[in-house]
Amino acid sequence: MRATKKETFDLLFDMLKQYYQGLLDGLIKTAGVLIIVAGWVATSSTLAEHLRTHRWERYIGIGLIAMGHILFAIIAYRVYRLSHRTYDLLKEVDYLDSRYYDNFLVRRITYLLYYSANLVITLGIILMLWTIQ
């Protein structure tokens, strides 16, 4: 038994909404963690002293922060692509005019803005870690 157009549409529309909402949710959670890390690096004299005397730990921290950004970028790009694929499938189903669900498509500018926001915070933390003397 095959799904009806409505059932297929409902499934795909829910997926499209989850991609859209999930990307923003992921950005907010990631940014929150990064801001906490930035605050810790900026305000902890104990951490600064420790990283001054243990440079390799500072470099590991920089590497982990950079890898976190790369992972965020890969996941965000995958969500962006899945959003477009799901949108195309919704149009193929042709159950409802695309203007009714168009606003849930993850646009390139949205992906780039989220990526850039994460990059700015990441670079700020890396700069703080790098300049500890």
Image: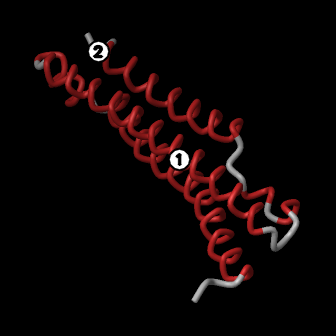
Q: Secondary structure at mark 2?
A: loop
Using the image as rendered, state which of residue 118 and residue 16 is in the foreground. 16
Left or right? Give the position of 112 relative to 93. left
The mark found on residue 27 in the picture is 1
Residue in front for this viewpoint, 85 or 61: 85
On screen, residue 43 versus residue 10, left or right, reads left
Percent coordinates x, y for residue 42 in the rendering: 37, 28
Where residue 41 appears, as percent x and y from the top left, is 33, 30
Image disc number at residue 56: none
Q: Mark 2 belongs to which amino acid?
A: Ile
Q: Residue placed at 80% from the left, 57% from the top?
A: 102
Q: Residue at x 60, y 39 (%)?
A: 114
Query: The C terminus lies in which quarter of the figure?
Result: top left
CA separation in Å, label 1 and label 2: 27 Å
Q: Is residue 110 above or below residue 126?
A: below
* Image side of residue 49 versus residue 9, left or right: left
Within 10 angstroms of label 2, few (less than 14), some, or many (20 or more) residues? some
Residue at 35% in and 27% down: 66
